[in-house]
Amino acid sequence: MRNMLATLLLSQGTPMLLAGDEFARTQGGNNNAYCQDNDISWVNWDIPEAGQAQIQFVKTLIALRRKYPILRRNRFLSGEINERIGIKEITWINASGAEMQQEQWTDDMMLCFGMLLDGRAQATGIRQRGSDATILIILNSYHDVVTFTLPGSETNAAWMLMVDTNQGKSDFYGQAFATGDTYDVTGRSLLVFSLAAETDAVKDEVKAKIQK
């Protein structure tokens, strides 16, 4: 459920949730419940502990989406280098930290890869570099752990872990990793990293983003 929620709320465009999705409400498989005036369509607001944890996770995703404009661009993303500014908006990364090659897209075993959104990319119609954060989203559909190498950058920066769908927030949130470090991505999980200068001030800021 967390993987699906994260995929939705971290995608470009307008995310749409059905009331109760944020705490794992179910209609028992009925996707046409408008005429069901019973438990199928009712929303039970007596939310158990697991549902409350799910609500907090959804709040985390919404906070990230609001904080980082690069997650809600109003322009189509391009995988081509913008020659004017020398930046590629989106780059697909394999587990070795290198850019995905064409043949890897047809490799049935390529089940873990990353989407790198470069915050320096052109954000508007004006041909100039942007100043958004750079975000790395890793998706692992493999059933087991994949060791993922975090890609490098042109600056002395660190990757700050923001989301790991297979862990509770207190277990990982705000950990910093140098470019080139590896991270053991657990099976069937989604991760979000933000590139930031590796300073105590930035670490404190990152931790405060979701606590608000």
Image: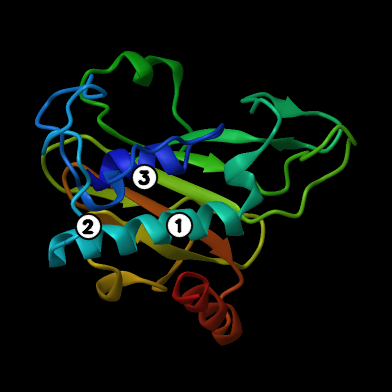
> How would you rate the neighbour count of disc 2 (Cα within 10 Å): few for under 14, some for 14-19, many for 20 or more?
few
Callout 3: SS:
helix
Residue 121 lies in quadrant: top right
Callout 1: SS:
strand
Q: Is residue 77 left or right of residue 123?
A: left
Q: CA distance from mark 2 to mark 3?
A: 23 Å
Q: Mark 1 vs mark 3: which is more N-terminal?
A: 3
Name the residue beneath numbered marker 1. 193
Q: Where is residue 131 shown, x and y percent of the image?
A: 76, 54
Q: Where is residue 80 shown, x and y percent of the image?
A: 67, 24
Name the residue: 65% across, 49% down: 69
The N terminus: image quadrant: top left
Q: Where is residue 53 shown, x and y percent of the image?
A: 23, 64
> How would you rate the neighbour count of disc 3 (Cα within 10 Å): few for under 14, some for 14-19, many for 20 or more?
many
Name the residue: 65% across, 35% down: 89
Name the residue beneath numbered marker 3. 6
- The kind of residue on which mark 2 rests is Trp
